[in-house]
Structure formats: structure tokens, C-alpha cells
Amino acid sequence: MRKNKVKPQVELNKLENTVVNAKTIEEFDNLMKISELVGWKWESGYSPRQGNLVSERWEAYKERICVCISNGELSYGPKNTYKKTLSFQQFCDMNNLTQEKLNDLINKN
């Protein structure tokens, strides 16, 4: 008998024009997992973790990239474009994602 996988519930603060700079592939992957859980998509319509996009995007852009979040849509932008960017930890803090809660969400996804 096959069990249905239940997605963990997560609620984030409403984010408009928020810029997050993930410094490692692990932070980037976790940001994409969280984005997928809340239903955000890339502006192209792709799901945040579709195919090999996480590792491909990280390898292509890691040195100069920030993830821009606006109205549930993700896009890329160069770090030097924005006056204020959040670290992944600041993003987690503003959304009350403790390390324990983050681990629980990530491990279930």
C-alpha cells in the first residue's frame, strides 16, 4: 500500500520585493525547498526544484546572485543591484524558522 506524502505546513510573512543572498548551495537548496512548500515559482513558471535546476543555477550564478521574491514569484538578480539584501539566516529569522523547524521542513520535503 502506497502512502501519500503529506507536505509540512509552513506560513511565511508576505514578501514583496525581498532579496535573499544564499551563500552556500545548502542555503540555496533550502531556500528552494521552502519556496516549493509555499507554492512559489520561478518567473518562468518552473517549480523551484524542478529537475537539476538547483545545482545548475547554483553553479551558473553562485558568485553574483540573489534570489528576488515578489508576490510568490522568484527571479535572479546581481548582488550589487540591491541596496539591502537578506542573508538566508535573516530570511529564516523574519519568518520564525528556527533551526529545528527548518530541519523538520527540509527533511520532510
Image: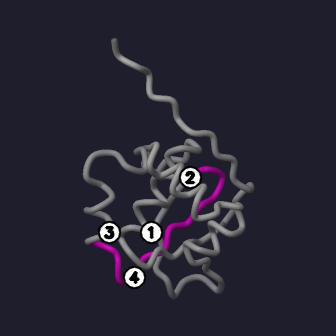
Other-residue count near label 1 (Cα within 10 Å), few / some / many at <14 / 14–19 / ≥20? some
Q: Which residue carries the number 2 mark? A: 73
Q: Earlier in the sequence, mark 2 or mark 4?
A: 4
Res 29 → quadrant: bottom left
Say which element carries label 4.
Answer: loop
**Residue type indicated by callout 3:** Trp
Say which element carries label 1.
Answer: helix
Q: Which residue carries the number 3 mark? A: 58
Q: Position of residue 40 (x, y in %)?
A: 55, 47
**Residue type indicated by callout 4:** Arg
**Residue type indicated by callout 1:** Glu
Q: Position of residue 85 (x, y in %)?
A: 61, 80
Give the alpha-carbon distance from disc 2 to disc 1, as whole Å. 18 Å
Q: Which residues are magenta?
A: 60-73
Say which element carries label 3.
Answer: helix
Q: Which residue carries the number 4 mark? A: 64
Q: Which residue carries the number 1 mark? A: 27
Q: Earlier in the sequence, mark 2 or mark 1?
A: 1
Other-residue count near label 4 (Cα within 10 Å), few / some / many at <14 / 14–19 / ≥20? few
Evaluate if marks 1 and 4 touch, with contact meaning CB atoms under 8 Å apart. no
Give the alpha-carbon distance from disc 1 to disc 4, as whole Å. 15 Å
Is 103 a magenta residue? no
Give the alpha-carbon distance from disc 2 to disc 4, as whole Å. 20 Å
Q: Earlier in the sequence, mark 3 or mark 2?
A: 3
Q: Earlier in the sequence, mark 1 or mark 4?
A: 1
Q: Viewer-nearest of labels 1 and 4?
A: 1
What residue is at 64 percent from the left and 86 percent from the top?
83
